[in-house]
Image (cartoon, rainbow, N blue to C red):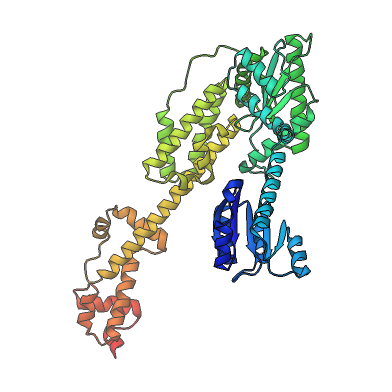
Amino acid sequence: MNLLIAEDEIRILNSLAYNIPWDRHGIEVVGLAGNGREALAIAERRMPDIVLLDIEMPEMDGLALAETLLKRAPQTGIIILSGHDDFSYAQRAIGLGVTKYLLKPAGEEEILQSVVELAAEIRRELSEKHSLGELKRMWSSRLPQLQEDFLRGLMTTRYAPWELRKHCMELNLELPEDRRYAVAVCDMDPLAEGERRFAPADLPLLRFSLHSIAREFVPAGECRVFSDAGGVAVLVFPGRPGETEGDLTTRINTRMSRLLGTVRECLKLTASAGMGTTCLLADISQSYRQACIALRERAVYGHEIAIPYLEVRRSERTILPDSSFEKQLEIAICTGEGLLALEQVDVYAEEAFAAADFSGLIYEHLLYLSGAFTRIILSQGWPMKKVLGPDYAYFLSLEGLVSKEQITEWAKRVTARIVSYAEEERSSSSNHLVKSLRELVDSRLADDLSLYSLAESLYVNSSYLSRLFKRETGESFSGYVLARRMERAKELLLGDAKVYDAAQATGYRDISYFAKVFRKYWGVAPSGLKK
Protein backbone atom coordinates (compact mmCIF):
# COMPACT_ATOMS: atom_id res chain seq x y z
CA MET A 1 0.00 0.00 0.00
CA ASN A 2 1.25 3.50 -0.89
CA LEU A 3 0.83 6.34 1.63
CA LEU A 4 0.94 10.12 1.11
CA ILE A 5 1.27 12.38 4.21
CA ALA A 6 0.23 16.05 4.11
CA GLU A 7 0.95 18.24 7.19
CA ASP A 8 1.98 21.90 7.34
CA GLU A 9 3.90 21.61 10.63
CA ILE A 10 7.32 20.24 9.64
CA ARG A 11 7.99 18.67 13.05
CA ILE A 12 4.76 16.68 12.95
CA LEU A 13 5.30 15.80 9.27
CA ASN A 14 8.76 14.33 9.96
CA SER A 15 7.48 12.50 13.01
CA LEU A 16 4.66 10.88 11.04
CA ALA A 17 7.02 9.94 8.23
CA TYR A 18 10.03 8.62 10.15
CA ASN A 19 8.95 7.62 13.67
CA ILE A 20 6.22 5.18 12.64
CA PRO A 21 7.42 1.78 11.30
CA TRP A 22 5.30 1.80 8.14
CA ASP A 23 7.45 -0.75 6.28
CA ARG A 24 6.78 -3.44 8.89
CA HIS A 25 3.13 -3.38 7.84
CA GLY A 26 3.66 -3.37 4.08
CA ILE A 27 3.10 0.37 3.74
CA GLU A 28 5.41 2.64 1.72
CA VAL A 29 5.44 6.42 2.16
CA VAL A 30 5.54 7.77 -1.41
CA GLY A 31 5.26 11.49 -0.70
CA LEU A 32 5.42 14.24 1.92
CA ALA A 33 3.66 17.58 1.42
CA GLY A 34 3.63 20.78 3.43
CA ASN A 35 0.42 22.21 1.95
CA GLY A 36 -2.72 21.12 0.12
CA ARG A 37 -1.64 22.09 -3.41
CA GLU A 38 1.69 20.31 -3.08
CA ALA A 39 -0.15 17.21 -1.82
CA LEU A 40 -2.52 17.33 -4.79
CA ALA A 41 0.39 17.55 -7.25
CA ILE A 42 2.14 14.57 -5.61
CA ALA A 43 -1.09 12.55 -5.58
CA GLU A 44 -1.56 13.09 -9.33
CA ARG A 45 1.95 11.76 -9.97
CA ARG A 46 2.18 8.90 -7.44
CA MET A 47 -1.51 7.88 -7.14
CA PRO A 48 -1.36 6.82 -3.45
CA ASP A 49 -3.74 4.22 -2.04
CA ILE A 50 -4.08 6.13 1.27
CA VAL A 51 -3.70 9.82 2.12
CA LEU A 52 -3.08 10.95 5.72
CA LEU A 53 -3.70 14.71 5.90
CA ASP A 54 -4.11 17.62 8.28
CA ILE A 55 -7.38 19.53 8.07
CA GLU A 56 -5.78 22.98 8.40
CA MET A 57 -3.14 23.64 5.71
CA PRO A 58 -2.18 26.72 3.64
CA GLU A 59 -3.24 27.17 -0.01
CA MET A 60 -5.80 24.31 0.17
CA ASP A 61 -7.29 22.94 3.40
CA GLY A 62 -7.65 19.24 4.11
CA LEU A 63 -11.37 19.01 3.37
CA ALA A 64 -10.98 20.73 -0.02
CA LEU A 65 -8.04 18.46 -0.81
CA ALA A 66 -9.99 15.36 0.21
CA GLU A 67 -12.94 16.41 -1.94
CA THR A 68 -10.70 16.95 -5.00
CA LEU A 69 -8.84 13.66 -4.51
CA LEU A 70 -12.00 11.61 -4.14
CA LYS A 71 -13.52 13.14 -7.25
CA ARG A 72 -10.48 12.15 -9.29
CA ALA A 73 -9.84 8.78 -7.63
CA PRO A 74 -12.87 7.59 -5.61
CA GLN A 75 -11.06 4.46 -4.46
CA THR A 76 -8.48 6.50 -2.48
CA GLY A 77 -8.59 6.00 1.29
CA ILE A 78 -8.55 9.31 3.25
CA ILE A 79 -7.64 9.71 6.96
CA ILE A 80 -7.92 13.20 8.44
CA LEU A 81 -5.94 14.54 11.41
CA SER A 82 -7.77 17.49 12.94
CA GLY A 83 -7.25 19.81 15.86
CA HIS A 84 -10.98 20.63 15.82
CA ASP A 85 -13.51 18.52 17.70
CA ASP A 86 -16.34 20.50 16.11
CA PHE A 87 -18.96 17.99 14.91
CA SER A 88 -19.57 20.00 11.71
CA TYR A 89 -16.02 19.25 10.51
CA ALA A 90 -16.43 15.53 11.07
CA GLN A 91 -19.89 15.58 9.52
CA ARG A 92 -18.61 17.25 6.36
CA ALA A 93 -15.64 14.88 6.17
CA ILE A 94 -17.91 11.83 6.38
CA GLY A 95 -20.16 13.33 3.73
CA LEU A 96 -17.20 13.66 1.40
CA GLY A 97 -16.28 10.00 1.82
CA VAL A 98 -13.39 10.32 4.28
CA THR A 99 -12.69 6.96 5.90
CA LYS A 100 -11.42 8.06 9.34
CA TYR A 101 -11.39 11.33 11.32
CA LEU A 102 -8.72 11.47 14.07
CA LEU A 103 -8.34 14.26 16.61
CA LYS A 104 -4.95 15.70 17.52
CA PRO A 105 -2.93 14.91 19.41
CA ALA A 106 -3.49 11.36 18.19
CA GLY A 107 -0.75 8.95 19.21
CA GLU A 108 1.53 7.22 16.74
CA GLU A 109 0.05 3.85 17.64
CA GLU A 110 -3.49 5.10 16.98
CA ILE A 111 -2.47 6.61 13.65
CA LEU A 112 -0.58 3.45 12.62
CA GLN A 113 -3.54 1.25 13.60
CA SER A 114 -5.96 3.41 11.59
CA VAL A 115 -3.78 3.29 8.47
CA VAL A 116 -3.18 -0.48 8.81
CA GLU A 117 -6.90 -1.17 9.21
CA LEU A 118 -7.72 0.98 6.16
CA ALA A 119 -5.01 -0.81 4.14
CA ALA A 120 -6.51 -4.18 5.10
CA GLU A 121 -9.96 -2.97 4.06
CA ILE A 122 -8.66 -1.78 0.68
CA ARG A 123 -6.92 -5.15 0.15
CA ARG A 124 -10.17 -6.99 0.90
CA GLU A 125 -12.07 -4.86 -1.61
CA LEU A 126 -9.45 -5.52 -4.27
CA SER A 127 -9.57 -9.23 -3.53
CA GLU A 128 -13.34 -9.33 -3.82
CA LYS A 129 -13.24 -7.32 -7.01
CA HIS A 130 -10.91 -9.83 -8.60
CA SER A 131 -12.42 -12.91 -7.03
CA LEU A 132 -13.31 -15.98 -9.04
CA GLY A 133 -16.97 -15.01 -9.12
CA GLU A 134 -16.17 -11.60 -10.50
CA LEU A 135 -13.85 -13.10 -13.09
CA LYS A 136 -16.60 -15.50 -14.16
CA ARG A 137 -19.02 -12.63 -14.51
CA MET A 138 -16.55 -10.68 -16.62
CA TRP A 139 -15.81 -13.79 -18.70
CA SER A 140 -19.51 -14.28 -19.38
CA SER A 141 -19.95 -10.68 -20.46
CA ARG A 142 -16.97 -10.96 -22.82
CA LEU A 143 -17.84 -14.42 -24.12
CA PRO A 144 -20.02 -13.36 -27.11
CA GLN A 145 -17.24 -11.09 -28.38
CA LEU A 146 -14.61 -13.80 -27.87
CA GLN A 147 -16.80 -16.26 -29.78
CA GLU A 148 -17.13 -13.82 -32.69
CA ASP A 149 -13.38 -13.20 -32.70
CA PHE A 150 -12.75 -16.94 -32.91
CA LEU A 151 -15.30 -17.45 -35.69
CA ARG A 152 -13.80 -14.51 -37.60
CA GLY A 153 -10.39 -16.15 -37.36
CA LEU A 154 -11.87 -19.53 -38.31
CA MET A 155 -12.86 -18.07 -41.69
CA THR A 156 -9.24 -17.47 -42.67
CA THR A 157 -7.30 -20.04 -40.58
CA ARG A 158 -7.30 -23.80 -40.85
CA TYR A 159 -7.28 -25.55 -37.46
CA ALA A 160 -6.45 -29.14 -36.64
CA PRO A 161 -9.44 -31.11 -35.27
CA TRP A 162 -8.02 -31.15 -31.73
CA GLU A 163 -7.53 -27.36 -31.85
CA LEU A 164 -11.14 -26.87 -32.91
CA ARG A 165 -12.39 -29.06 -30.07
CA LYS A 166 -10.21 -27.17 -27.57
CA HIS A 167 -11.36 -23.70 -28.67
CA CYS A 168 -15.02 -24.72 -28.88
CA MET A 169 -14.90 -26.18 -25.38
CA GLU A 170 -13.14 -23.10 -23.92
CA LEU A 171 -15.56 -20.69 -25.62
CA ASN A 172 -18.69 -22.77 -25.01
CA LEU A 173 -19.30 -23.01 -28.77
CA GLU A 174 -21.48 -25.85 -30.03
CA LEU A 175 -20.00 -26.77 -33.43
CA PRO A 176 -20.33 -30.55 -33.83
CA GLU A 177 -17.57 -32.16 -35.90
CA ASP A 178 -19.89 -34.72 -37.50
CA ARG A 179 -22.10 -32.11 -39.22
CA ARG A 180 -21.77 -30.44 -42.62
CA TYR A 181 -21.42 -26.66 -42.70
CA ALA A 182 -21.82 -23.92 -45.30
CA VAL A 183 -20.97 -20.22 -45.21
CA ALA A 184 -22.84 -17.30 -46.77
CA VAL A 185 -21.63 -13.69 -46.91
CA CYS A 186 -23.96 -10.74 -47.37
CA ASP A 187 -23.09 -7.14 -48.21
CA MET A 188 -24.83 -3.93 -49.22
CA ASP A 189 -24.96 -3.17 -52.95
CA PRO A 190 -23.48 0.08 -54.28
CA LEU A 191 -25.67 3.12 -53.77
CA ALA A 192 -27.60 4.30 -56.81
CA GLU A 193 -26.53 7.57 -58.43
CA GLY A 194 -29.71 9.34 -57.32
CA GLU A 195 -29.54 8.17 -53.68
CA ARG A 196 -29.85 11.18 -51.37
CA ARG A 197 -30.39 9.60 -47.94
CA PHE A 198 -26.98 7.95 -47.74
CA ALA A 199 -23.48 8.63 -49.05
CA PRO A 200 -20.58 6.19 -49.67
CA ALA A 201 -19.15 7.28 -46.30
CA ASP A 202 -22.23 5.72 -44.63
CA LEU A 203 -21.27 2.19 -45.75
CA PRO A 204 -20.06 1.13 -42.24
CA LEU A 205 -23.42 2.23 -40.79
CA LEU A 206 -25.35 0.37 -43.50
CA ARG A 207 -23.27 -2.77 -42.95
CA PHE A 208 -23.98 -2.59 -39.23
CA SER A 209 -27.69 -2.29 -40.01
CA LEU A 210 -27.49 -5.31 -42.33
CA HIS A 211 -25.69 -7.30 -39.62
CA SER A 212 -28.40 -6.41 -37.09
CA ILE A 213 -31.20 -7.36 -39.51
CA ALA A 214 -29.53 -10.71 -40.20
CA ARG A 215 -29.24 -11.46 -36.47
CA GLU A 216 -32.91 -10.74 -35.90
CA PHE A 217 -34.14 -12.37 -39.11
CA VAL A 218 -32.46 -15.78 -38.85
CA PRO A 219 -34.11 -17.99 -36.19
CA ALA A 220 -32.01 -18.58 -33.09
CA GLY A 221 -29.86 -21.69 -33.39
CA GLU A 222 -30.15 -21.95 -37.19
CA CYS A 223 -26.88 -20.15 -37.88
CA ARG A 224 -24.24 -17.92 -36.35
CA VAL A 225 -24.02 -14.32 -37.60
CA PHE A 226 -20.94 -12.09 -37.25
CA SER A 227 -18.92 -9.60 -39.30
CA ASP A 228 -15.64 -10.38 -41.02
CA ALA A 229 -12.59 -8.10 -40.92
CA GLY A 230 -14.05 -5.95 -43.72
CA GLY A 231 -17.43 -5.47 -42.04
CA VAL A 232 -19.29 -7.89 -44.34
CA ALA A 233 -21.96 -10.03 -42.64
CA VAL A 234 -20.99 -13.72 -42.39
CA LEU A 235 -23.58 -16.43 -41.72
CA VAL A 236 -22.36 -19.93 -40.74
CA PHE A 237 -25.06 -22.59 -41.22
CA PRO A 238 -24.53 -25.98 -39.51
CA GLY A 239 -26.38 -28.91 -41.00
CA ARG A 240 -29.20 -30.50 -39.03
CA PRO A 241 -29.12 -34.14 -37.92
CA GLY A 242 -30.08 -36.29 -40.90
CA GLU A 243 -30.13 -33.31 -43.32
CA THR A 244 -28.59 -34.01 -46.72
CA GLU A 245 -26.12 -31.65 -48.40
CA GLY A 246 -28.77 -30.78 -50.99
CA ASP A 247 -31.33 -29.95 -48.32
CA LEU A 248 -28.80 -27.78 -46.46
CA THR A 249 -27.97 -25.89 -49.65
CA THR A 250 -31.65 -25.36 -50.46
CA ARG A 251 -32.36 -24.14 -46.92
CA ILE A 252 -29.51 -21.61 -47.08
CA ASN A 253 -30.57 -20.40 -50.53
CA THR A 254 -34.14 -19.85 -49.34
CA ARG A 255 -33.04 -18.16 -46.13
CA MET A 256 -30.64 -15.77 -47.89
CA SER A 257 -33.16 -14.82 -50.58
CA ARG A 258 -35.69 -13.92 -47.89
CA LEU A 259 -33.04 -12.00 -45.94
CA LEU A 260 -32.30 -9.84 -49.00
CA GLY A 261 -36.00 -9.04 -49.30
CA THR A 262 -36.12 -8.05 -45.62
CA VAL A 263 -33.14 -5.75 -46.09
CA ARG A 264 -34.91 -3.98 -48.96
CA GLU A 265 -38.07 -3.55 -46.86
CA CYS A 266 -36.16 -2.19 -43.84
CA LEU A 267 -33.52 -0.01 -45.49
CA LYS A 268 -35.10 0.69 -48.89
CA LEU A 269 -31.73 -0.38 -50.32
CA THR A 270 -30.53 -3.64 -51.85
CA ALA A 271 -27.97 -6.19 -50.69
CA SER A 272 -26.49 -9.29 -52.33
CA ALA A 273 -25.15 -12.57 -50.99
CA GLY A 274 -22.62 -15.20 -51.96
CA MET A 275 -22.90 -18.83 -50.81
CA GLY A 276 -20.11 -21.38 -50.44
CA THR A 277 -20.43 -25.14 -50.81
CA THR A 278 -20.98 -27.51 -47.88
CA CYS A 279 -17.95 -28.86 -46.02
CA LEU A 280 -16.71 -30.27 -42.73
CA LEU A 281 -15.94 -27.88 -39.88
CA ALA A 282 -12.18 -28.19 -40.43
CA ASP A 283 -12.62 -26.95 -44.04
CA ILE A 284 -15.01 -24.11 -43.29
CA SER A 285 -12.48 -21.47 -44.37
CA GLN A 286 -12.77 -22.88 -47.90
CA SER A 287 -16.54 -22.39 -47.89
CA TYR A 288 -16.01 -18.79 -46.72
CA ARG A 289 -13.58 -18.10 -49.58
CA GLN A 290 -16.05 -19.58 -52.05
CA ALA A 291 -18.84 -17.37 -50.69
CA CYS A 292 -16.67 -14.27 -51.12
CA ILE A 293 -15.85 -15.29 -54.70
CA ALA A 294 -19.54 -15.86 -55.42
CA LEU A 295 -20.44 -12.44 -54.00
CA ARG A 296 -17.99 -10.78 -56.41
CA GLU A 297 -19.96 -12.26 -59.30
CA ARG A 298 -22.71 -9.70 -58.70
CA ALA A 299 -20.55 -7.59 -61.03
CA VAL A 300 -21.88 -9.93 -63.74
CA TYR A 301 -25.35 -10.93 -62.50
CA GLY A 302 -26.49 -7.66 -60.95
CA HIS A 303 -27.77 -6.69 -57.51
CA GLU A 304 -30.17 -8.10 -54.90
CA ILE A 305 -29.36 -11.69 -55.69
CA ALA A 306 -28.11 -14.70 -53.72
CA ILE A 307 -25.31 -16.21 -55.82
CA PRO A 308 -24.12 -19.81 -55.24
CA TYR A 309 -20.48 -20.68 -55.81
CA LEU A 310 -20.07 -22.58 -59.07
CA GLU A 311 -16.68 -24.05 -59.84
CA VAL A 312 -16.68 -23.50 -63.60
CA ARG A 313 -13.44 -23.51 -65.55
CA ARG A 314 -13.04 -20.01 -66.93
CA SER A 315 -11.20 -19.13 -70.09
CA GLU A 316 -7.65 -17.93 -69.60
CA ARG A 317 -8.13 -14.87 -71.79
CA THR A 318 -7.33 -11.44 -70.46
CA ILE A 319 -7.78 -7.93 -71.75
CA LEU A 320 -5.30 -6.16 -74.01
CA PRO A 321 -4.42 -2.48 -73.58
CA ASP A 322 -6.29 -0.34 -76.10
CA SER A 323 -3.74 2.34 -77.01
CA SER A 324 -6.10 3.86 -79.57
CA PHE A 325 -8.86 4.38 -76.98
CA GLU A 326 -6.43 5.83 -74.47
CA LYS A 327 -4.90 8.26 -77.00
CA GLN A 328 -8.25 9.45 -78.31
CA LEU A 329 -9.49 9.95 -74.75
CA GLU A 330 -6.42 12.04 -73.87
CA ILE A 331 -6.83 14.17 -77.02
CA ALA A 332 -10.53 14.79 -76.29
CA ILE A 333 -9.71 15.81 -72.71
CA CYS A 334 -6.82 18.09 -73.64
CA THR A 335 -8.77 19.80 -76.44
CA GLY A 336 -11.75 20.47 -74.22
CA GLU A 337 -14.14 18.09 -75.99
CA GLY A 338 -15.82 16.80 -72.85
CA LEU A 339 -18.85 15.24 -74.52
CA LEU A 340 -16.62 13.27 -76.89
CA ALA A 341 -14.48 12.04 -73.97
CA LEU A 342 -17.57 10.86 -72.07
CA GLU A 343 -18.89 9.12 -75.16
CA GLN A 344 -15.58 7.28 -75.65
CA VAL A 345 -15.59 6.02 -72.05
CA ASP A 346 -19.23 4.96 -72.33
CA VAL A 347 -18.58 3.01 -75.54
CA TYR A 348 -15.49 1.34 -74.06
CA ALA A 349 -17.38 0.22 -70.94
CA GLU A 350 -20.37 -1.05 -72.92
CA GLU A 351 -18.24 -3.14 -75.28
CA ALA A 352 -15.90 -4.39 -72.55
CA PHE A 353 -18.57 -5.46 -70.08
CA ALA A 354 -20.78 -7.04 -72.72
CA ALA A 355 -18.01 -9.55 -73.42
CA ALA A 356 -17.04 -10.11 -69.75
CA ASP A 357 -18.67 -13.32 -68.51
CA PHE A 358 -17.08 -13.41 -65.06
CA SER A 359 -16.01 -10.91 -62.46
CA GLY A 360 -12.28 -11.40 -63.05
CA LEU A 361 -12.47 -9.81 -66.51
CA ILE A 362 -14.63 -6.97 -65.21
CA TYR A 363 -12.06 -6.11 -62.56
CA GLU A 364 -9.26 -6.28 -65.13
CA HIS A 365 -11.10 -3.66 -67.19
CA LEU A 366 -11.49 -1.60 -64.01
CA LEU A 367 -7.75 -1.81 -63.37
CA TYR A 368 -7.01 -0.80 -66.96
CA LEU A 369 -9.35 2.21 -66.79
CA SER A 370 -7.86 3.37 -63.49
CA GLY A 371 -4.39 3.06 -65.00
CA ALA A 372 -5.42 5.00 -68.13
CA PHE A 373 -6.88 7.83 -66.04
CA THR A 374 -3.77 7.89 -63.85
CA ARG A 375 -1.43 8.10 -66.88
CA ILE A 376 -3.44 10.95 -68.44
CA ILE A 377 -3.47 12.98 -65.21
CA LEU A 378 0.21 12.46 -64.39
CA SER A 379 1.33 13.13 -67.98
CA GLN A 380 -0.10 16.65 -67.60
CA GLY A 381 1.70 17.17 -64.29
CA TRP A 382 -1.59 17.53 -62.39
CA PRO A 383 -2.09 16.42 -58.75
CA MET A 384 -4.23 13.25 -58.65
CA LYS A 385 -6.06 14.10 -55.42
CA LYS A 386 -6.98 17.60 -56.58
CA VAL A 387 -8.20 16.46 -59.99
CA LEU A 388 -10.27 13.51 -58.75
CA GLY A 389 -11.81 15.03 -55.62
CA PRO A 390 -14.07 12.51 -53.79
CA ASP A 391 -13.35 9.84 -56.42
CA TYR A 392 -9.68 9.74 -55.38
CA ALA A 393 -10.69 7.30 -52.60
CA TYR A 394 -11.69 4.70 -55.20
CA PHE A 395 -8.19 4.75 -56.72
CA LEU A 396 -6.83 3.77 -53.31
CA SER A 397 -9.39 0.99 -52.88
CA LEU A 398 -10.88 -0.21 -56.17
CA GLU A 399 -12.71 -3.08 -54.47
CA GLY A 400 -15.32 -0.49 -53.50
CA LEU A 401 -16.55 -0.71 -57.11
CA VAL A 402 -18.49 -3.96 -57.34
CA SER A 403 -20.75 -3.86 -60.40
CA LYS A 404 -20.59 -3.05 -64.11
CA GLU A 405 -23.05 -0.21 -63.66
CA GLN A 406 -21.13 1.29 -60.75
CA ILE A 407 -17.80 1.03 -62.61
CA THR A 408 -19.30 2.68 -65.72
CA GLU A 409 -20.74 5.57 -63.69
CA TRP A 410 -17.44 5.95 -61.85
CA ALA A 411 -15.46 6.03 -65.12
CA LYS A 412 -17.76 8.69 -66.61
CA ARG A 413 -17.63 10.72 -63.41
CA VAL A 414 -13.82 10.59 -63.34
CA THR A 415 -13.70 11.60 -67.00
CA ALA A 416 -15.92 14.59 -66.28
CA ARG A 417 -13.67 15.61 -63.39
CA ILE A 418 -10.54 15.44 -65.55
CA VAL A 419 -12.23 17.42 -68.35
CA SER A 420 -13.38 20.06 -65.86
CA TYR A 421 -9.91 20.35 -64.33
CA ALA A 422 -8.32 20.61 -67.78
CA GLU A 423 -10.73 23.43 -68.65
CA GLU A 424 -9.85 25.25 -65.42
CA GLU A 425 -6.17 24.86 -66.20
CA ARG A 426 -6.67 26.22 -69.71
CA SER A 427 -8.69 29.14 -68.36
CA SER A 428 -6.06 29.90 -65.74
CA SER A 429 -3.30 29.66 -68.35
CA SER A 430 -5.28 31.89 -70.73
CA ASN A 431 -5.78 34.52 -68.05
CA HIS A 432 -2.08 34.44 -67.27
CA LEU A 433 -1.14 34.84 -70.95
CA VAL A 434 -3.52 37.75 -71.49
CA LYS A 435 -2.29 39.42 -68.32
CA SER A 436 1.33 39.00 -69.44
CA LEU A 437 0.49 40.38 -72.89
CA ARG A 438 -1.15 43.46 -71.39
CA GLU A 439 1.86 44.04 -69.16
CA LEU A 440 4.17 43.82 -72.17
CA VAL A 441 2.07 46.33 -74.12
CA ASP A 442 2.01 48.80 -71.23
CA SER A 443 5.78 48.56 -70.77
CA ARG A 444 6.60 48.89 -74.50
CA LEU A 445 4.23 51.57 -75.80
CA ALA A 446 7.18 53.37 -77.40
CA ASP A 447 8.33 50.22 -79.27
CA ASP A 448 7.12 48.23 -82.23
CA LEU A 449 4.20 46.28 -80.81
CA SER A 450 3.65 43.67 -83.48
CA LEU A 451 1.67 40.68 -82.26
CA TYR A 452 4.21 38.35 -83.83
CA SER A 453 7.14 39.71 -81.77
CA LEU A 454 5.13 39.72 -78.56
CA ALA A 455 3.95 36.14 -79.16
CA GLU A 456 7.57 35.09 -79.54
CA SER A 457 8.38 36.72 -76.20
CA LEU A 458 5.59 34.64 -74.59
CA TYR A 459 6.55 31.45 -76.49
CA VAL A 460 3.14 31.01 -78.11
CA ASN A 461 1.72 31.06 -81.62
CA SER A 462 0.68 34.58 -82.76
CA SER A 463 -2.61 33.39 -84.29
CA TYR A 464 -3.52 31.52 -81.09
CA LEU A 465 -2.57 34.55 -79.01
CA SER A 466 -4.75 36.83 -81.16
CA ARG A 467 -7.80 34.57 -80.82
CA LEU A 468 -7.18 34.07 -77.11
CA PHE A 469 -6.96 37.83 -76.49
CA LYS A 470 -10.18 38.42 -78.41
CA ARG A 471 -11.99 35.68 -76.49
CA GLU A 472 -10.81 36.82 -73.06
CA THR A 473 -11.17 40.61 -73.47
CA GLY A 474 -13.84 40.99 -76.16
CA GLU A 475 -11.65 43.33 -78.25
CA SER A 476 -8.95 42.89 -80.88
CA PHE A 477 -5.29 43.14 -79.97
CA SER A 478 -4.72 46.05 -82.35
CA GLY A 479 -7.71 47.92 -80.87
CA TYR A 480 -6.30 47.42 -77.36
CA VAL A 481 -2.85 48.72 -78.41
CA LEU A 482 -4.40 51.79 -80.06
CA ALA A 483 -6.50 52.57 -76.99
CA ARG A 484 -3.52 52.27 -74.62
CA ARG A 485 -1.36 54.50 -76.85
CA MET A 486 -4.03 57.16 -77.20
CA GLU A 487 -4.70 57.19 -73.45
CA ARG A 488 -0.98 57.50 -72.74
CA ALA A 489 -0.58 60.29 -75.34
CA LYS A 490 -3.50 62.21 -73.84
CA GLU A 491 -2.00 61.84 -70.37
CA LEU A 492 1.36 63.19 -71.56
CA LEU A 493 -0.13 66.13 -73.46
CA LEU A 494 -2.25 67.16 -70.50
CA GLY A 495 0.95 67.07 -68.48
CA ASP A 496 2.51 69.76 -70.73
CA ALA A 497 4.57 67.34 -72.90
CA LYS A 498 5.33 68.46 -76.43
CA VAL A 499 3.41 66.81 -79.30
CA TYR A 500 6.69 65.37 -80.64
CA ASP A 501 7.56 63.82 -77.25
CA ALA A 502 4.03 62.34 -76.87
CA ALA A 503 4.29 60.80 -80.36
CA GLN A 504 7.71 59.28 -79.63
CA ALA A 505 6.58 57.95 -76.24
CA THR A 506 3.66 56.09 -77.84
CA GLY A 507 5.54 54.53 -80.76
CA TYR A 508 4.80 57.04 -83.56
CA ARG A 509 7.83 58.25 -85.54
CA ASP A 510 5.73 60.29 -87.99
CA ILE A 511 4.23 63.25 -86.13
CA SER A 512 1.67 64.03 -88.82
CA TYR A 513 0.43 60.44 -88.77
CA PHE A 514 0.26 60.59 -84.98
CA ALA A 515 -1.78 63.78 -85.17
CA LYS A 516 -4.16 62.19 -87.67
CA VAL A 517 -4.69 59.10 -85.51
CA PHE A 518 -5.07 61.20 -82.35
CA ARG A 519 -7.69 63.47 -83.96
CA LYS A 520 -9.63 60.49 -85.25
CA TYR A 521 -9.60 58.79 -81.80
CA TRP A 522 -10.26 61.78 -79.52
CA GLY A 523 -11.99 64.17 -81.99
CA VAL A 524 -9.44 66.90 -81.38
CA ALA A 525 -5.90 67.58 -82.60
CA PRO A 526 -3.00 67.10 -80.17
CA SER A 527 -2.23 70.80 -80.27
CA GLY A 528 -5.87 71.63 -79.60
CA LEU A 529 -5.87 69.38 -76.55
CA LYS A 530 -2.89 71.27 -75.14
CA LYS A 531 -4.68 74.60 -75.64
Quadrant for residue 152, please give it: top right
What x and y, as percent, mark residue 520?
32, 77
Quadrant for residue 60, please give it: bottom right
Task: Between residue 506 and residue 178, name the one nearer to us.
Answer: 178
What x and y, as percent, mark residue 246?
74, 10
Residue 280, placed above or below residue 220: above
What x and y, as percent, mark residue 276?
65, 17
Task: Between residue 68 and residue 128, name the one nearer to us.
Answer: 128
Name the residue at the right extreme. 219
Decide if residue 46 is on the left or right side of residue 136: left
Residue 495, placed above or below residue 160: below
Decide if residue 522 is on the left or right side of residue 219: left
Visible residue check, residue 98: no
State which quarter of the image contains the C terminus: bottom left
| Residue drawn at the location 59% of the way across and 46% of the way down | 24
| Residue drawn at the location 57% of the way across and 63% of the way down | 13
| Residue drawn at the location 20% of the way across and 80% of the way down | 501
| Residue drawn at the location 43% of the way across and 23% of the way down | 320
Decide if residue 481 is on the left or right side of residue 374: left
Visible residue check, residue 449: yes
What x and y, as percent, mark residue 375?
40, 37
Quadrant for residue 112, please give it: bottom right
Residue 495, placed above or below residue 389: below
Task: Between residue 324 and residue 205, name the one nearer to us.
Answer: 205
* Number of dots carrying numbers: 0
Task: Between residue 482 and residue 108, name the one nearer to us.
Answer: 108
